[in-house]
Amino acid sequence: MKSALCEQELDEPLADELTEQALQWLVDLHAGEGQSASWDDYLRWCATSPVHQQAAQTAERLWERLGSTLERPKSRRMPLLGLVLAIGLAGGSYWQAQNHGWMADERTAVGERRSVQLADGSRVELAPRTRVDIELSGTQRLVRLYAGEVFVQVAADPQRPFEIEAGNGRIRALGTAFDVRNSGNSVHLVVTEHAVRVTHGQSAQVAEVEEGQGLQYGAQWLSRPQVVDVNAATAWRRDRLVFNERPLGEVVDELRRYHSGVIWLRDDELGSLPVTGIVGTGDVMAQLQLLQQSLPLRVRQLPWLTVIERDPDRTK
């Protein structure tokens, strides 16, 4: 019988996603932002599991093929395998796998959407790069959203509340349909039918969000409900992304869910440029080329890495 970690190693979509994460680490560390502490964090990430270690080795080989030199600080040259053994891989890797949903009940790959019909009649639609655990018992119905986005249509059951656990909060359906996105640093909620109740763990605040409203929360904060464009917020269900004066950095974050490889926005100032329009999710590179025509930027595509940088021949 194979262990959970052995099964994890054989999961190709997971390995690809972790390779992209490792390459993103290298991009960030070589963009002038990587201090020694950041390298420490990277090495700890590498040591999370054997799959993380393999992904890091693959990413480092890809980085060197691009003609770039790994600029790891001399004091941080401990071999990855040695670091893995030093921290006690088995227990730590299993905890990390559980905590981050790497062995989640349902996972979607890049560009993949999936609809899951639950035994109680509820339906959960998963956006690309989404990981969830689903628990149905005699007393509750719970979806743990580790990463990504879901649209939920809840079947009525007064005896068993339906809740989504995402980040530092719980979202309870009050007979409803709603959309939840967990981006890591924050959670975004949009209600399309009836209402939901949000309980924020850190602040112990409670907010009720009505149909046509949305809110956001992070580790230590909870926004007030406000009116949102529901059709725009749920356009991903129709293979579209709708932006209205959204910063380019946020647009790129959304497009990453539909693209295999790393999209690197080199210039932080470029990330603040406003973007308005409807973007198709079927061909991310084509959409980036369209952005290149309307904004002062240029797009360079390399193996596993797409670089978006300022075009020196154009001004805003």
Image: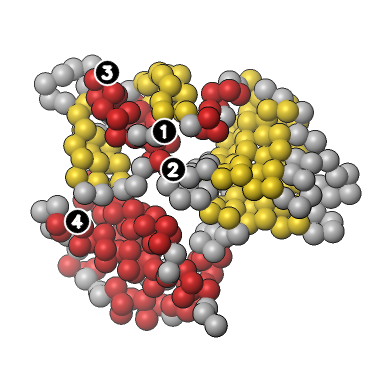
Which residue sits at x=20%, y=40%?
A: 301
Q: Residues within 10 Å of mark 1 (few under 14, many from 20)?
A: many
Which residue sits at x=48%, y=32%?
A: 239
Q: Position of residue 293 (x, y in %)?
A: 24, 20
Identify the mark nearer the N-term, 1 or 2: 2
Which amino acid, by three-letter code, is at mark 2?
Answer: Gly
Q: Pointer 3: what residue?
A: 294
Which of 130/187 is in front?
130
Q: Position of residue 235 (x, y in %)?
A: 53, 28
Q: Label 1 vs label 2: CA separation? A: 8 Å
Which mark lies nearer to you, 2 or 3? 2
Do residues under tags 2 and 4 come within 8 Å of each other at their CB atoms? no
Q: Secondary structure at mark 3?
A: helix
Identify the mark nearer the N-term, 3 or 4: 4
Identify the mark nearer the N-term, 2 or 3: 2
Identify the mark nearer the N-term, 1 or 3: 1
Q: Is residue 92 left or right of residue 125?
A: left
Which amino acid, by three-letter code, is at mark 1?
Answer: Thr
Which mark lies nearer to you, 4 or 1? 1
Q: Is residue 207 visible?
A: no
Which residue sits at x=69%, y=47%?
A: 117
Q: Pointer 1: what residue?
A: 281
Which amino acid, by three-letter code, is at mark 3?
Answer: Ser
Do residues under tags 1 and 2 come within 8 Å of each other at their CB atoms? yes
Q: Label 1 vs label 3: CA separation? A: 18 Å
Q: Pointer 4: what residue?
A: 63
Q: Secondary structure at mark 2?
A: loop
Q: Pointer 2: what residue?
A: 111
Q: Label 2 vs label 4: CA separation? A: 24 Å
Q: Label 3 vs label 4: CA separation? A: 30 Å
Which mark lies nearer to you, 1 or 3? 1
